[in-house]
Image (cartoon, coloured by chain):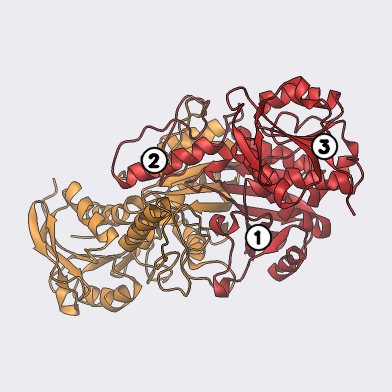
Chain colours: A red, B orange
């Protein structure tokens, strides 16, 4: 069926998300005519394997995008701000995994299960939402569509891989040191670029990304603002508390939601989610069935469990939403957007 | 000032909480004339140290409570159900750390900072609330008193020590095995007596205690029901999602609260909590100051940070509440109740 192939560039190919982008492109047998792996000067020269062939990573420059049809960016916001427009100028469609363009009104912010039609409005750049936002809106969309949404309050349980490979190493080294009762000086978490660092091993850090003037962190504001944009619900009440935990892969979320509709049961909600695209219902308390970060790791779906009707409000429910933050939260959502661009004849 | 001394029994002395009860009695120089350490047959004969003296643990029986003035129970609900009435029959006041009597209308359920006056209503048994409830109501009480409470939604981040010393060992052994990429079969968490067990190391388990028919866990229902009882607010809307995490000591809670009062700022809330009994405010985003489980471990207070005004509702706030689950969550609250019983001339 698919015959056209594309010159694809991956920017940030050596990072935790970049690696998973290559895995996804390979697993999905994405129609690639040529693959350019790009990075900062620091990682240039490294060799990565794609479909059994060794590809050398090259330093990204404006000229790297000559002839590129599709560029997947995941090398930090400043790289995207500088180079994504250069790629677009040269005819590429950019799918950007950083926060650089997400709230730009000219840039669609897309989770295919939720707002695929927004892809038609692109002006060269399409933004991939924040990891913790993606899995939540994927789980909320079936409820919005059938019952309407008024209010969302989320508390997150986020894995360190969201802060990159250095954070995974810090968690491992620090866990080993603590088990050995040895000293360890934290240097990466909660936020590498921030002033202070705290131990993550056997701990919980209520800070992801930098604090904003309103007392919320940037991660929390991303969840709040991106959810409204993706769902086209500017009036939706959303609040978030984001917490980093000693987990390598898999974000979990405790989500409270108030619907527009009264009189629904937990079973009604389960039935809606069971048949929703990209969602796997894992919810059977009698058999202790519920999703966990470890059970979601390596999978592309969003897993939902612990669905309960609120004991006080007839229109309110609680649920537990888990997904692999590097896959649906980042690499898979980006590659999924790319697949949809082809299916919708936008990338051609 | 204090001259009277008491014969004190600790039931469950060899457990994680029991050990901390001994630490608290020693640290607070509790007025003890005689100390009886009691346990199941399995732990009888063990030797513990109290104030430099070795005390042998004896098997608990009804007769163990002859002459006892004060009995601190923390050996599981069935032991309390069987032996607490025997202790009362023999003239002791019982402070019970299990869930056996908490919702009994004849039994006061007490957090001294919140409802100390309820101690006067005791009929021999006083119940110590669930760990995750205690720290939350301690943080909510200053707001209830000044501004009134309408609604509470909490998501917890709970340490394994709440499931006993065996759970701490499981977390350590499993963490080491995972770091070594070795196999490990979980046998304790999430609930030792339940059918299935899941890995806790580098994971998050949305189950604490057994599931109830309404889809909530017993831990979640404890938080909901105990909060209403302790605060004397049967109409308060409370919802909880309780999650076990790879943390040894220190429960954290993401708490959303709707007040009876509009127009307050986050600073108003901080000012109220700063001067509240048993509360330590740790809240300065500019300096990355917020409490964490590791920073709370070994301390008796409840630590509150991340206080934010909700972005949508004028009467709503978010906060992050952390405390040592073995101390304020269990042993310290029990010993604190005992101290108040003396101060109020109830234990005499």
Chain letter belonging to callout 3: A
Residue labelled with disc 3: A108
Which residue appears farthest toward the front when viewing the image?
Answer: A53
In the rendered image, residue A111, in percent from the top left (x then y), is placed at: 77, 46
Residue at x-position 70% and y-position 36%: A97
Compared with residue A172, is residue A124 higher up or lower down, i.e. above or below? above
Separation of marks 3 and 2 at Cα, in angstroms = 39 Å
Crowding near the residue tagged with mark 2, few <14, some 14–19, many ≥20 C-alpha atoms within 10 Å: many
Decide which of B175, A44 is in the foreground and name it.
A44
Residue at x-position 56% and y-position 55%: A293
Decide which of B223, B265 is in the foreground and name it.
B223
Residue at x-position 39% and y-position 40%: A174
In the rendered image, residue B322, in percent from the top left (x then y), is placed at: 43, 45
Residue labelled with disc 2: A174
Number of the label disc, if any, that sits on residue A304? 1
Tell me if residue A152 can be seen.
no
Looking at marks 1 and 2 on the same chain, the residue that comes earlier in the sequence is marked by 2
Tell me if residue B255 can be seen.
yes
């Amino acid at each position: 069926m698919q015959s056209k192939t594309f010159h694809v560039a991956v920017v940030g190919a050596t990072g935790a998300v970049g690696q998973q982008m290559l895995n996804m492109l390979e697993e999905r047998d994405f129609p690639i005519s040529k693959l350019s792996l790009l990075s900062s000067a620091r990682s240039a020269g490294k060799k990565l394997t794609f479909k059994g062939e060794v590809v050398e990573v090259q330093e990204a420059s404006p000229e790297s995008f000559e002839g590129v049809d599709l560029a997947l960016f995941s090398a930090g916001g400043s790289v995207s701000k500088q180079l994504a427009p250069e790629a677009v100028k040269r005819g590429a469609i950019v799918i950007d995994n950083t926060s650089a363009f997400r709230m730009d009104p000219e840039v669609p912010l897309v989770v295919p299960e939720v707002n695929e039609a927004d892809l038609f409005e692109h002006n060269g750049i399409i933004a991939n939402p924040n990891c913790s936002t993606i899995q939540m809106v994927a789980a909320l969309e079936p409820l919005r569509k059938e019952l309407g949404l008024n209010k969302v309050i989320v508390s997150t349980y986020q894995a360190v891989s969201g802060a990159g490979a250095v954070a995974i190493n810090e968690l491992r080294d620090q866990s080993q040191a603590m088990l050995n009762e040895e000293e360890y000086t934290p240097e990466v978490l909660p936020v590498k670029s921030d002033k202070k660092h705290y131990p993550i091993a056997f701990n919980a850090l209520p800070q992801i990304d930098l604090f904003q003037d309103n007392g919320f962190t940037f991660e929390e504001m991303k969840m709040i603002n991106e959810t409204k944009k993706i769902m086209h619900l500017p009036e939706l009440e959303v609040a978030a508390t984001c917490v980093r935990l000693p987990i390598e892969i898999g974000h979990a979320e405790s989500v409270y939601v108030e619907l527009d509709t009264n009189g629904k049961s937990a079973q009604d909600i389960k039935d809606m989610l069971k048949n929703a695209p990209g969602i796997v219902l894992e919810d059977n308390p009698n058999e202790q069935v519920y999703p966990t970060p470890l059970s979601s790791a390596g999978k592309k779906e969003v897993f939902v469990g612990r669905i309960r009707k609120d004991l006080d409000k007839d229109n309110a429910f609680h649920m537990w939403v888990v997904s692999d933050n590097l896959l649906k939260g980042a690499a898979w959502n980006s590659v999924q957007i790319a697949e949809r661009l082809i299916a919708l004849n936008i990338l051609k």
